Image (cartoon, rainbow, N blue to C red):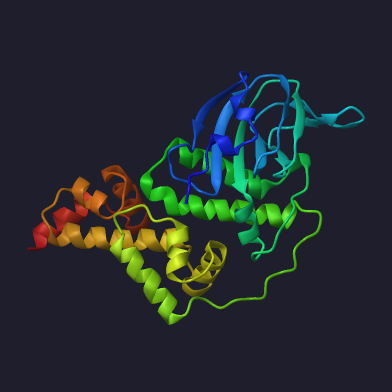
Amino acid sequence: MVELGLADTLGVLRQPDVRPRATSAGLGLTDLYVSSQRERPFRADFAAAPTHLLVLHLNGTVTVRRGRGEVTRSRTVLPGGLFLHPAGRELSVELEGGLDTVHAYLTDQALREANGGRPVEPAEELGVVDPLAEQVLRELDSTVRHWEPSARTYVDQLTSMLAAQVVRRHVARLPAPEPARSGLSDRQLAAVHTLMHDRIGDPLPIADLAAAAALSPSQFTRRFRAGTGHSPHQYLLGLRLERAVRLLRTGSASIGQVARACGFSHQEHLTRVMRTRMGTTPAALRREAQHGR
């Protein structure tokens, strides 16, 4: 699949008064493009784009106008306010003050996945408050700013969560709830488990895990959690930690080598996860193993 990039956006990020600070360019994300930036006042018209745009206002307060002539909406947007523009529609917008924002561009496929494969049309929103969407957007921004290859599975989950929240809260009509599903079958879980072990040292997109179970990414994520009690990212992190513990106790590779072989970005990443989950560190674990020999 092709990475989502700047060419798939409305064009706001190409404005001379918009100064990007961090983007997801080059990270290989196929259903999401994220950018954080400083925006100065501007007024512009943009052609329709193939992606749905969400803008989170990090500060402010600013007035935003949307539309042309008599068909114009104006709203003073507070920090934490959201701007939502559906795919396939032209946009005329005026920003009266400067502020910092996070932009997230979602593919229509991501929204369809969140809606059980059915088409969905988001509403145009201006200055609405959605604490969950805000939290997800802030987390996406932070993850992109401090990128680690092992975060790919986590970002895919955040993308699905954001798409699901758009479907749940920001459409004209709420979709019919999807019937309750059980977890993965034994065969599906075995296939996913094998793939996780085979590629434990590599970035592993949710789409690849879903394909192993012959499910869509959104179906896979829901059914995996229903069956295991964990998100795919947390489950995979646990497998990586188990492998690292085994190598530290029985092998002679350096801690940094063990970390990379098990899918952690670097030694500090492994140390952080091990301290959080086990209350110890790789160095302490290795010393204990050597002392017991």
Query: In the picture provided, is 223 more to the left or to the right than 279?
Result: right
Task: Give coordinates of residue 42: x percent, y percent.
Answer: 71, 20
Residue 67: image quadrant is: top right
Residue 84: image quadrant is: top right
Q: Which residue is pictured at 34% across the width and 47% down the height? A: 272
Q: Does residue 147 sit above or below 69 in this rendering?
A: below
Residue 286: image quadrant is: bottom left
Q: Quadrant of the C terminus?
A: bottom left
Task: Give coordinates of residue 200: x percent, y percent.
Answer: 31, 59
Give the number of callouts. Answer: 0
Task: Give coordinates of residue 128: x percent, y percent.
Answer: 76, 42
Task: Give coordinates of residue 151: x percent, y percent.
Answer: 42, 49
Q: Which of 135 and 19 is in front in this view?
A: 19
Q: Nearer the viewer, residue 236 or 220?
A: 220
Query: In the picture provided, is 272 more to the left or to the right than 114?
Result: left
Q: Which residue lies furthest to the bottom in this view?
A: 186
Q: Does residue 47 sit above or below 292 in this rendering?
A: above
Q: Which residue is pictured at 48% across the width and 47% down the height? A: 2
Q: Which residue lies furthest to the left in this view?
A: 293
Q: Which residue is pictured at 81% across the width and 58% down the height? A: 173
